[in-house]
Amino acid sequence: MVPGVALSELWSGISYGEQVLQVVAIFVVIVGLLGMLMALYTSLNERRREIAILRALGVGPVKVIFLLVLESGLLTLLGTILGIGIVYGSLLLLQPIIEQRFGLHIPLRPLTATQYGYLTYVVLGGIAIGLIPAWKAYRNALSDGLSVRV
């Protein structure tokens, strides 16, 4: 077989694997965002009284929505920064071991524009997810959070 043809087939097979890994990564991000939605939604029920007090003090519903969306955006942003730090830190620590044991050199490279685009989509997804509990907080009546529950 001609080396060019063999290499072409090899790269074709690897590209399928790369596409599969991209789909898996998308599902991991979706599951992560849904987990954050559930956590925010659950904590919203516990913070109902806090939000009602803010509204009683004159904070408008738009500011309450802004606070909850800001919280989800910051959580997502800090999560992405922490994730990048863990990946680069692990690679920095494990690179000599991987190279010695498997003969595989994984270089430390800065993020590409495409990767920054993916990270932007993840943060925007986190902000969008924050709109759901924020909308619920907006719809809650002021008396609902200030009433005593038995």
Image (spheres, rainbow, N blue to C red):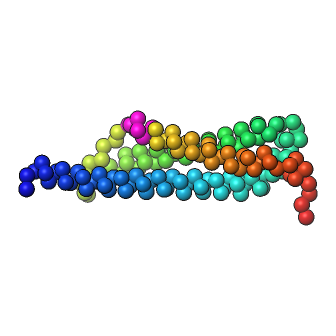
Q: Residue at x 41, y 45 (%)?
A: 88
Q: Quadrant of residue 10?
A: bottom left
Kindly indicate the quadrant of the structure image that contains residue 17. bottom left
Whether residue 149 is visible: yes
The total number of labels drawn is 0
Q: Farthest bottom residue?
A: 150
In percent of width and height, residue 25 lies at 44, 53
The spot of residue 117 in percent (x, y) is: 46, 38
73 horizontally vs 81: left or right: right
Residue stretch in magenta: 110-116
Q: Position of residue 118 (x, y in %)?
A: 46, 42
**Quarter the N terminus occupies:** bottom left
Picture residue at 71% right of the left edge, 38% below the top: 66
Rendered location of residue 4, percent (x, y): 12, 48
Which residue lies at the image location 68% right of the left edge and 52% below the top edge? 40
* 49 inside magenta stretch: no
Note whether residue 81 is visible: no
Left or right of residue 33: residue 130 = right
> Quadrant where the C terminus lies?
bottom right
Image quadrant where residue 62 sits: top right
